[in-house]
Image (cartoon, helix red, strand yellow):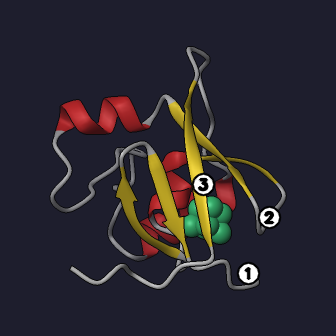
Amino acid sequence: MAELEHKYEVDIHQTEERQKIPDSVKEELKKSGMMDEKGKLKLNGVSPKMLKKMKQEYVECPVLKTDIHFVQCFVCPNFQSRVMGKVLCKGDPL
Ligand code: SF4
């Protein structure tokens, strides 16, 4: 299979700490139907178990130059796919 075109392979890290999704991102998620009014995430094709794991993951985003909650990365326009603990990221300016 041809590899997807991407600029970065970004490592996914785990944390035990509670991570907050920024309010601006929550608004976006709500608008696109990926979060309900109570703040519960509804991502298509993602099981509750997977979601729980995703909530403890983050990436050091090479575009925004900061740590990003994996859920935010997952819904980012640059997100292509997740392969063996890495995010394939298009790397376009956000
Ligand atoms: S997909 Fe988006 S959030 Fe994730 S690493 Fe790339 S630019 Fe950053």
Report the amino acid beneath label 2: Leu
Distance from mark 3 CB to nearest ligand 1 atom below 8 Å: yes
Measured Cα–Cα span from mark 3 to mark 2: 12 Å
- Say which of 72 and 61 sits in front: 61
Q: Could you classify mark 3 by the number of other residues whose Cα lies within 10 Å: few (under 14), some (14-19), or many (20 or more)?
A: some
Helix, strand or loop status at disc 2? loop
Could you tell me how many numbered marks the image carries? 3
Residue at screen point 46% across, 67% down: 75
Quadrant of the displayed image that contains ligand 1: bottom right
Q: Quadrant of the C terminus?
A: bottom right
Report the amino acid beneath label 3: Val
- Asked if residue 52 lies left or right of residue 17, the reply is left
Residue at screen point 47% across, 85% down: 5
Query: What x and y, as percent, mark residue 62?
Result: 76, 62
Q: Residue furthest top?
A: 16
Distance from mark 2 CB to nearest ligand 1 atom below 8 Å: yes
**Number of the label disc, if any, that sits on residue 94:** 1
Earlier in the chain: of badge 2 and badge 1, it is 2
Q: Residue furthest front?
A: 1
Q: State the residue position of label 3.
A: 10
Residue at screen point 58% across, 21% down: 15
**Number of the label disc, if any, that sits on residue 64:** 2
Distance from mark 1 CB to nearest ligand 1 atom below 8 Å: yes
